[in-house]
Amino acid sequence: MRLVLLGAPGSGKGTQADLLKARYGCIHISTGDILRRHLKDKTELGIRAGGFMSKGELVPDDLVVEMVKEKLREDSADSFVADGFPRTLPQAEALENVLKELDRPLDAVVFLQIEEELLIRRLIHRRTCRRCGKIWNVLTMTGGTEVCPECGGELDQRGDDAESIIRNRIDVYRGQTEPLIEWYAKKGILRSIDAVNSPEETFKEIQVVLGR
Ligand code: AMP
C-alpha cells in the first residue's frame, strides 16, 4: 500500500501514520521527523532547514525532495505512508515522477479534514514522547501529563507548536498545500475523511475508504 496523508498541521497525520504502520507494516515517511533529526544532529541539512522550521515556513522544495527520493529508493517504495510530504505542487510532481520511475504509483491520498480552531487547540496541547516518539494531547490524556503513559519517557513540546507560529503554519498550509487537494482529486485518488473524531474512529474511517 502506498499512501499520502494530506491535511493541515494538527489534523492527525502523524497519529494516523503510526496506526497505519502498525496495522499494515508500511514504512512511515515523515519529512518533519527526518528534518527534526537532522536539526538535532546539527547536519548541514539540519542547519539550513532549522531557520525555516522555527518560523513555521516550508523548507525549500529541492532539499526536501532529495531527502524523500533517497528514502524511497533505499526502501524500494513498496509500501509506505507519507505524512507531511508532499506539501507543494512541485513536491507532488517530484513524488509522482520518482514513483513512475520505480513503477510504484500511489494507491490513495487520504485528506484529513478539520476546522481551524480545533487545529490550534490540538497543536497547543500536543506533546511528543522523547523516548518512544508517541504523540499525546494533554487535554485528553488520563493519569497525569508529565510522562508518556506508554513508556514513561519525558514529554516534549515542539518549539513550532507556539500559537503565533501555529497560525503561520496554517497560513502556509492554506497557500501552498491546499491546492494539492484539487490536484489529487482530479487524478481520482483523493479520499476525504472527517478528522474531528478520536484517533481510533478516524482510523476506522480510513480503513473503510481504503477498503481494507
Ligand atoms: P511537520 O512535523 O510535518 O509539521 O513539519 C515541521 C516543519 O518541517 C514544517 O513546518 C516545515 O518547516 C518542515 N517541513 C516538513 N515537511 C516539509 C515539506 N514536505 N516541505 C517543506 N517543509 C517541510
Image: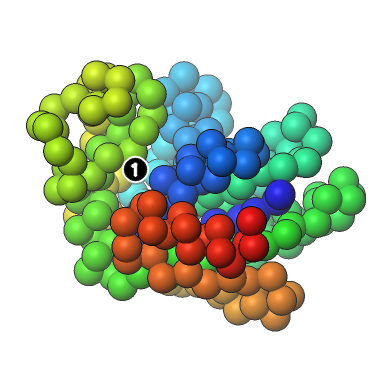
**Label 1: how many residues lie within 10 Å, few (<14), some (14-19) or many (20+)?**
some
**Quadrant the C terminus occupies:** bottom right
* Residue 47 visible to the viewer: no
At horizontal 73% and vertical 75% (from top left) the residue drawn is 187
Q: Position of residue 170 (x, y in %)?
A: 35, 64
13 with respect to 135 (left or right): right
42 with respect to 100 (left or right): left
Q: Amino acid at mark 1?
A: Ser
77 with respect to 202 (left or right): right
At horizontal 48% and vertical 63% (from top left) the residue drawn is 205
Q: Position of residue 181 (x, y in %)?
A: 57, 73
Above or below for 114 versus 3: below
Instruction: Choose between 69 and 82: the one closer to the eye.
Output: 82
Determine the image quadrant of residue 167.
bottom left
At horizontal 52% and vertical 60% (from top left) the residue drawn is 206
Q: Position of residue 66 (x, y in %)?
A: 70, 40
At horizontal 18% and vertical 47% (from top left) the residue drawn is 140
Q: Position of residue 58 (x, y in %)?
A: 48, 53
Q: How is the image coloured?
A: rainbow
Q: Which residue is mark 1?
A: 54
Q: How many marks?
A: 1
Name the secondary structure under disc 1. Answer: helix
Above or below for 108 versus 81: below
Residue furthest to the left? 144
Q: Is mark 1 within 8 Å of ligand 1?
A: no
* Residue 206 visible to the viewer: yes
Determine the image quadrant of residue 137.
top left
Instruction: Choose between 52 and 79: the one closer to the eye.
Output: 79
